[in-house]
Image: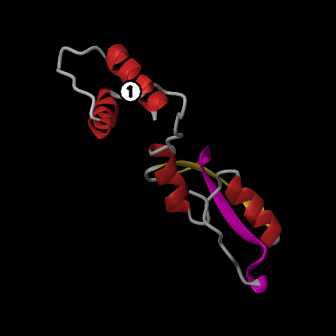
Amino acid sequence: MTEKVQAADDQFPTLVYKGHGPHSRAGGTYDFAPANDQEDLDAKLADGWFTTLPEAIDAQDKPAVKSDDTAPPTRKELETKAKELGIKFTNKTADAELSAAITAAIAKE
């Protein structure tokens, strides 16, 4: 999640924080760096730094999950799409077979 943070000009330089670093605090370790202007702040935030220390430490425990659009569809996704297309199937229908039926039905449209 990239959120635009706008700091007032009189708030520079300011500090930004990142989890996993040489400094420790209850809850985890962290690193910090200065952001000297808005452009520097935007670049650091885009690179995974945070404006508050609790956010940085919390983020190290819950790393961002990147979506993998190349992953094959789950069984639930296959079943949902098959139902949308009116394809009949049972619990014994293999995922590969269901996927092929969906592909064929979409090609006919």
Magenta stretch, overall SS: strand
Side of 53 relative to 49 (left or right): left
Q: Give the range drawn in magenta.
A: 9-23
Query: 43 or 78: nearer the eye?
Result: 78
Side of 16 relative to 68 (left or right): right
The picture places residue 47, in percent across and down from the top left corner, at 70, 51
Query: 55 or 39: nearer the eye?
Result: 39
Q: Mark 1 points at which residue?
A: 102
Side of 14 relative to 101 (left or right): right
The amino acid beneath tag 1 is Ile
The picture places residue 90, in percent across and down from the top left corner, at 17, 21
Using the image, determine if residue 30 lies above or below residue 107.
below
The picture places residue 16, in percent across and down from the top left corner, at 67, 62
Query: 70 or 15: nearer the eye?
Result: 70
The picture places residue 71, in percent across and down from the top left corner, at 49, 27
Q: Does the magenta stretch include residue 56?
A: no
Using the image, determine if residue 73 lies above or below residue 61.
above
Please name the residue shown 27% across and 34% down the image: 86
Query: 37 or 89: nearer the eye?
Result: 89
For the N terminus, the image quarter is bottom right
**Picture quadrant of residue 2:** bottom right
Q: Is residue 25 visible?
A: no
